């Protein structure tokens, strides 16, 4: 949508400097969302935005990018790796994904134990890693936008999708008894093993719903977790598709432009 079609003020805004930048030309013919290089520091996230809402969402993208590159476990691991082995190749996302997967499987097995403390720790680990998967992935989809290699990005995204299933499996294994097998609905609810939790979680995340394991009729917390998993997983899948389509139709707004390159009469 062109800037001239909108009512709210259109500005060139840098989410790092938190300030508007006077463009050399007229913004009315520039698409909302077009990125440009901040004159203060070229790595800043700066774009043509509309009103306060536009600034707010650009700032959200900026914080996601900060998380991806500065504060995520992967970013911290990468920095430590460089400190320990300055001459080695920088660590790639692949080994980190395998590490995260291993931690999630350990958390899943812990969640199925009878020790309450272990179950709580498992839930905390899983909750944190669900956040990590989502923020890192959304950041790649909406901020970085250009995958280093498309095949690698999709492989990693699908692996992360599977990890979401494992992470939610923790919340099916950890709670007090709340499941029933089909045909035994009138018996007292029971807990399920870590393998069955993973199986149940995979059925939910793929929206298959085979229905041989069911939430017990008064397990309302479990229903809430299932609903949450469905929403999270579907949003995640949509963003994977978004990445895939973004390389086939490389949107010009995704390439940072110099302020001087923006169209419009120069003042
Ligand atoms: Zn800036």
Image (cartoon, grey):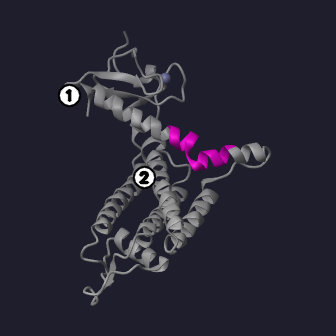
In this view, the residue in front, 4 or 212, is 212
**For the point 51% across and 49% down, which residue is it?**
147
Q: Which residue is mark 1?
A: 5
Find residue 187 and report its horizontal and vertical position in percent: 29, 87
Above or below, 180 relative to 68: below
Mark yes or no: residue 213 visible.
Answer: no
Q: Which residue is mark 2?
A: 243
Find residue 140 and report its horizontal and vertical position in percent: 48, 47
What residue occupies the far top of the structure in this picture?
267
Q: In the rendered image, which quarter is residue 3 located in?
A: top left
Label 2 packing within 10 angstroms: few (<14), some (14-19), many (20+)? many
Above or below, 81 relative to 10: below
Mark yes or no: residue 43 visible.
Answer: yes
Find residue 60 and report its horizontal and vertical position in percent: 40, 37
In this view, the residue in front, 125 or 151, is 125
Find residue 163 and report its horizontal and vertical position in percent: 49, 64
Q: Which segment did they paint magenta?
A: 66-79
N-terminal of the pair, mark 1 or mark 2, is: 1
Query: What secondary structure predominates along the stretch shown in magenta?
Result: helix
* SS at badge 1: helix
Q: Is mark 1 within 8 Å of ligand 1?
A: no
Membership of 81 in magenta stretch: no
């Amino acid at each position: 949508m062109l800037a001239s079609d909108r009512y709210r003020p259109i500005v060139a805004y840098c989410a790092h400097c938190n300030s508007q930048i006077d463009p050399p030309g007229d913004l009315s013919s520039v698409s909302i969302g077009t990125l440009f290089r901040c004159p203060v520091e070229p790595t800043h996230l700066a774009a043509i935005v509309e009103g306060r809402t536009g600034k707010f969402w650009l700032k959200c993208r900026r914080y996601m990018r900060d998380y991806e590159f500065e504060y995520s476990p992967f970013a911290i691991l990468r920095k430590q790796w460089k400190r320990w082995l300055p001459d080695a190749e920088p660590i790639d996302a692949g080994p980190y994904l395998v590490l995260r997967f291993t931690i999630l499987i350990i958390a899943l097995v812990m969640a199925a134990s009878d020790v309450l403390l272990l179950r709580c720790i498992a839930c905390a680990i899983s909750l944190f890693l669900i956040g990590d998967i989502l923020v890192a992935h959304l950041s790649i989809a909406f901020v970085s936008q250009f995958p280093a290699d498309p095949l690698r990005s999709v492989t990693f995204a699908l692996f992360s999708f599977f990890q979401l299933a494992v992470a939610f499996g923790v919340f099916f294994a950890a709670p007090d008894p709340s499941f029933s097998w089909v045909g035994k609905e009138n018996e007292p609810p029971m807990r399920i093993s870590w393998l069955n939790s993973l199986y149940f979680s995979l059925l939910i995340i793929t929206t298959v719903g085979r229905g041989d394991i069911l939430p017990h009729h008064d397990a309302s917390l479990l229903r809430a977790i299932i609903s949450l998993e469905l929403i999270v997983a579907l949003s995640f899948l949509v963003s994977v598709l978004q990445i895939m389509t973004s390389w086939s139709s490389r949107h010009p707004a995704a390439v940072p432009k110099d302020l001087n390159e923006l169209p419009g009469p120069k003042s």
